[in-house]
Image (cartoon, helix red, strand yellow):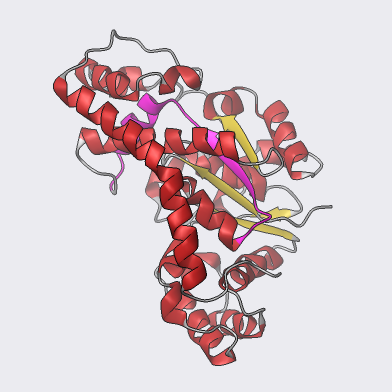
Amino acid sequence: MSDRPIFVVGCPRSGTTMLQLMLHAHPRIALPPESRFLLPAYERRHEFGDLGDPERRRALGEWITGTTHFGDLGLEPEAVVAAITSAPPTLGSALGTVFKMYAARFGKPRWGDKRPLYLRHLPTIRRLFPDAQIITIMRDGRDCVASLKETPWGPRDLGELIDIWARSADSALRAARTLPGDSFHQVRYEDLVADPEPHLRRICEFLGEAYDPAMARPSDLAPVAVPEYKTWHALTRSDVTTARISSWRQRLTAEETARCEAVFGDRLIRFGYQPATACRRTPLVRATRTWLTVRDRLAPARDRAEAVRGRLRGPALPARL
């Protein structure tokens, strides 16, 4: 049986919460609501100092338990601070201790986390958790844009919404090229909702776990693992459905659809989605596509530079749990 941490990633509004619940329904796996302290902790790692000092680990624990979404985990702050203080002296160990305690709350041995944004920060996840298993869920970019338009927290500018999916798609393609097969697995939202069991079985095979039928009923876990204030996740309390597949046809205007497809380029086709319009290469579209290509090609160099900076500053990183 494996004890490798599990991370669910993807573009926002691609089904990451549904997949989180499917995995949380497994008798050996627990994935919490979005905690949102992992990436800020990494970005501020130099502020925490030498984690070989128990007092610095205690200060880190107090910072984690004081973050905005910590309360969603249902953990006792004092117990978490004490556990981090006693944990191995690395940043990954401190963060992993929180997720491990969340899993223990449900009597489960395997732990991890879910946040769409992690897809664009996979090198960071692997620095903190070198043995992590990463599951990406991919959804039609037009549906993601349509859904993001309706959230209370998403950008209002269509160009920004399009950029969110394009960056996520490029990150997923790059991960598929570079990560080992036992560390990265991808599933399409449309396939998962149309016939959950075979795709969940493949995910379980990837994770080294036995399939459990409860995984196909994620709505049973929604009251436990999805905070009520997240009204944009209301559909997770209903049965798995195909009703939202290609809903962009009703939710996007013809002009919005054409702009999405023009900027996305062949990304849609590479993930198995067919464009509905002929590409119109306006100056804005050409400039945006050029910028996306340049940004994607520069990403590996940025990751290498960040790895060097990480070795030169801040506390020790890899988890030792």
Tell me: 5 left or right of 95: right
Residue farthest to the right? 1
Q: Is residue 54 left or right of residue 171?
A: right
Along the horizontal axis of the image, is 182 left or right of 210?
Answer: left
179 vs 135, nearest the viewer: 179
Please tell me which residue is depicted at 21% across the width and 15% down the height of the picture: 281
Percent from the top left, x then y, of residue 56?
A: 52, 87
- State which quadrant residue 239 falls in: top right
Q: How many marks?
A: 0
Tell me: 258 left or right of 49: left
* Direction left: furthest residue: 283
- Image position, residue 108 (x, y; %): 74, 60
Which residue is more in the foreground, 165 or 25?
165
Residue 88 on image: x %, y %: 67, 78
Q: Which residues are magenta?
A: 129-152
The outermost residue toward the top is 278
> Would residue 125 be visible to someone looking at this image?
yes
Residue 198 forms part of the magenta stretch: no
Position in image of residue 230 (x %, y %) = 40, 52
85 to 11, vertically: above or below: below
Magenta stretch holds residue 140: yes
Q: Residue at x 60, y 42 (%)?
A: 135
Residue located at (42% from left, 38% from top): 168
77 or 291: nearer the viewer: 291
Q: Is residue 92 above or below residue 219?
A: below
Q: Residue 125, located in which quarter of the rendered image? A: bottom right
Examine the rendering and report whether any part of residue 36 can be seen. Answer: no
